[in-house]
Image (cartoon, helix red, strand yellow):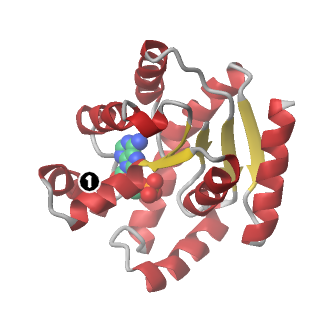
C-alpha cells in the first residue's frame, strides 16, 4: 500500500495508525532520510542539502535506498510506503521493484487538504518538531513540487484503478476513521 499527500497532510501520523491496525510495516522515506541526517551517515550528509531547501533528494540516491529497504525481510508480506513515489520516474522504478518481488499494490491512498490549511499546520508543527524544512518559503516550495510532480503520480494510480482519496482535514481521529473506511471499501 502507498500513502500519498502534500506536505503537512498528516501522512506520517495516519501511516502509523494504518500500519498498527493492519499489521503492515510502515516505511517512510522522509523518516529514513531524517535518521540518516541525525546520524550523519554519508547518505544523510548528501540528503540534507536537498531536504533543507525543500527539494527532492535525487533519484540516484532515493531509488536505491527504497529498493534496499523493500528487500528487507519484514517487507516481504506487505508494507505501507509513505513519501514514495513522488515523481513518475519513481513510479516506474517502484513498478520494477514490485515486479521483481512478485508483489503488487493493493491500495494507493491520497490524503487531500488545501494549501493554506497545510501552510498553517506546518508552521504550527515547526514550533514542535524544529524541522529545518518547516519554514514558510521552504513549505511553499515543497507544496509547489507536490503540485508539479506528485499529482502526476496520483493521476497514474487513478488510471490504474487503485487510487482512493480521503479528505485529510479535520481531527486526526476523524481522518483515521475515513482512512480505514476507504481502505476497507477498496478491499471489498
Ligand atoms: P517527508 O517527511 O515525506 O515530507 O519528506 C521530507 C523530505 O525528504 C522531502 O522534502 C525530500 O527532501 C525528501 N524525500 C522524501 N521522500 C522523497 C522521495 N520519494 N524523493 C525525493 N525526496 C524525498
Q: Give residue 68's position: percent from left, percent from top.
A: 31, 33
Please tell me which residue lies in front, 6 or 41: 41
Nearer to the camera, 85 or 118? 85
Q: How many marks?
A: 1
Task: Determine if residue 84 is in view.
Answer: yes
Neighbours of disc 1 within 10 Å: few (<14), some (14-19), many (20+): some
Outermost residue, bottom direction?
127
Residue 29: give x, y in percent of width and height: 40, 48
Q: Residue at x 77, y 61 (%)?
A: 175
Q: What residue is drawn where x is 81% and y is 66%?
A: 174
Residue 67 position within the rendered picture, expressed as x and y whole percent measured from the top left: 35, 30
Q: Relative to 104, does residue 131 appear above or below in the rendering?
A: below
- Dividing the image into 4 quarters, which one contains the C terminus? top right
Residue extending farthest to the front is: 73
Tell me the SS state at disc 1: helix
Ligand 1 has an atom within 8 Å of the beta carbon of the residue at disc 1: yes
**Quadrant of image for the N terminus:** top right
Picture quadrant where residue 45 is located: bottom left
Please name the residue shown 47% across and 40% down the image.
84
Compared to 157, does 135 lie above or below? below
Write down the quadrant of residue 33 in the picture. Answer: bottom left
Q: Which residue is mark 1?
A: 50
Identify the residue at image location x=60%, y=63%: 13
Amino acid at each position: 500500500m502507498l500513502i500519498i499527500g502534500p506536505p503537512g497532510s498528516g501522512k506520517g501520523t495516519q501511516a502509523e495508525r494504518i500500519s498498527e491496525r493492519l499489521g503492515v510495516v510502515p516505511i517512510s522515506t522522509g523518516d529514513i532520510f531524517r535518521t540518516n541526517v541525525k546520524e550523519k551517515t554519508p547518505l544523510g550528509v548528501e540528503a540534507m542539502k536537498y531536504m533543507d531547501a525543500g527539494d527532492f533528494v535525487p533519484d540516484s540516491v532515493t531509488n536505491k535506498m527504497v529498493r534496499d529497504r523493500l528487500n528487507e525481510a519484514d517487507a516481504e508480506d506487505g508494507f505501507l510506503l509513505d513519501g514514495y513515489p513522488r515523481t513518475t520516474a519513481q513510479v516506474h522504478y517502484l513498478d520494477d521493484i514490485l515486479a521483481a518481488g512478485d508483489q503488487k499494490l493493493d491500495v494507493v491512498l491520497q490524503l487531500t487538504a488545501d494549501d493554506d490549511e497545510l501552510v498553517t499546520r506546518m508552521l504550527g508543527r515547526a514550533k514542535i518538531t524544529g524541522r529545518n524544512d518547516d519554514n514558510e518559503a521552504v513549505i511553499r516550495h515543497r507544496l509547489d513540487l507536490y503540485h508539479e510532480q506528485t499529482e502526476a503520480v496520483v493521476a497514474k494510480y487513478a488510471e490504474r484503478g487503485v487510487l482512493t482519496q480521503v479528505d485529510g482535514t479535520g481531527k486526526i481521529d476523524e481522518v483515521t476513521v475515513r482512512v480505514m473506511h476507504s481502505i476497507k471499501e477498496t478491499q471489498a
